[in-house]
Amino acid sequence: MNHPGTGSNWLQVSGLVLAALAAGVFTGQYFLFLFLLAAAMLGWHLRQLKRLKDHLRSGKPLPNRNGSGPWQEVYGQIRNLQTGNRKRKRRLSRFVKRFREAVTALPDAVVILGREKDIEWCNPATSSLLALHWPECADKRITTLFKDPVLIEYLQTGQYSKPLRLISPAEKSRVLSIRLTPFGKKKRQYLLMARDITRIYHLDQARRDFVANVSHELRTPLTVISGFLETLSDAEEDCPDLALSRGLMQQQAQRMTDIISDLLVLSRLEMDERTDMKDPVPVPGLLVTIIKEADALTRSSGHVIELDADEKLWLLGNSHELHSAFSNLIFNAIQHTPNRSEVRISWKADGSGARFCVSDTGEGIAARHIPRLTERFYRVDKGRSRSSGGTGLGLAIVKHIINHHDAELKIESEPGRGSTFCCHFPAARTSPPVAIPQEPVARE
């Protein structure tokens, strides 16, 4: 669409050209007058261009009435752009102001770091949580301000998938959860957030201590009760009704013993957050051992176990913990499927690591139960689970062991079609077979 003044501008130019031609006809100097006209127009445009440059360099808005001829349209378009930019700048300023007000009001410490971990900005909460004071800490490297070697190592490793828990540098009675998140593609920056988890930490520690202490204290009286129940077997011939009562009591005592053992294992796993377990574990041989241990269950139930394992695929981790996790999944599949059913076990490499799967042909699990299966004492069918002798802690133990090995537990199930429990381990945890040194046998 043409500007309203475009037509008149062309008329003015056309008039000047005709005047120059007329003067040329009168004097016989066409090129001279056309050259003089072109030079005059060029000088006039250069003068208008200089005025525009001076206006833009001053940083002030262009006046409403300025420029003439075609420059009037140029000034008008630039004024429109300046007006739009001023509006966007005001909106952006209001947004940045609200964002800073919101971040400033956060009880968590927020620190924006540059590419070299230098502090670009932080909110007031960093003063009480991290002992960083703005603007005194501006442009300083955060690794030079902290003396805690654990925190420095966390900032320098580049592995920020899990938060770091440590004592607050500002107040030793506080426990912090620190997480570092990279952001920005071109300008690599980091967002560091520190949260006060003192209350949650102490509550969790009290819960763990309670479970561990109570479980430990209950083991002794249960051992005594089980011992006395064994001695009652001699009196069963004189009192036949005693045999049934003794059997029920012994069954419940054994169940309580199993629950306490699993609680102690779970408590130990929760307290031990090691992620550097890198011992080579021969998983195929480990699975063969677990299947042999399951013979007592399959001999009476008639289950058929099929194993498909890659003999050249090992895992870096803790052999004892992996044995516990894999055996829990295999025994669960046997106990929760009908007799003479088939249980399939596979250990294979995939595109991003290794996968251990246990599939059964049992009743299956409804979708609403799957997200809660790894909770303590959660049961899909309470009556059936108790009759099978389960403690309700097996999958909770599996989840913690899998987390220790940087792995992920996935459950697929459908009522009437069985279930599949898969543990996916990252490629960094896989290993080819290696020679494991044997401990020397002491001579008598």
Image (tube, rainbow, N blue to C red):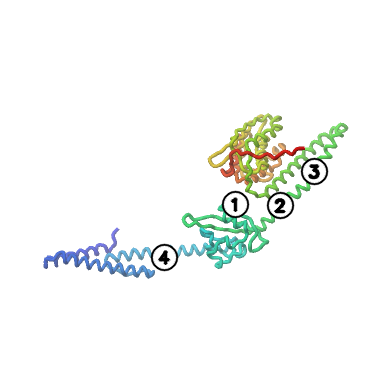
- The amino acid type found where label 2 is placed reads Arg
- The amino acid type found where label 1 is placed reads Lys
Label 4 close to label 3 by CB (< 8 Å): no
Residue that carries the numbered disc 2 in the rendered image: 207
* Front position among marks 4 and 3: 3
Could you tell me residue 17's position as x and y percent?
18, 64
- Which of these two is toward me, 9 or 314? 314
Left/right of residue 133 with respect to residue 64 in the rendered view:
right
The crowding category of the residue bearing disc 3, from other C-alpha atoms within 10 Å (few below 14, some 14 to 19, many at least 20), is: some
- The amino acid type found where label 4 is placed reads Arg
Residue that carries the numbered disc 3 in the rendered image: 222
* Front position among marks 1 and 2: 1
Instruction: Give the image quarter of residue 47.
Output: bottom left
Could you tell me residue 236's position as x and y percent?
85, 33
- Which of these two is toward me, 206 or 63? 206
Q: Is tag 3's residue or tag 1's residue first in the polypeptide sequence? A: 1
Q: Secondary structure at mark 3?
A: helix
- The amino acid type found where label 3 is placed reads Leu
Residue that carries the numbered disc 4 in the rendered image: 86
Q: Is tag 2's residue or tag 3's residue first in the polypeptide sequence? A: 2
Q: Give the Cα separation between the discs numbered 2 and 3.
A: 22 Å
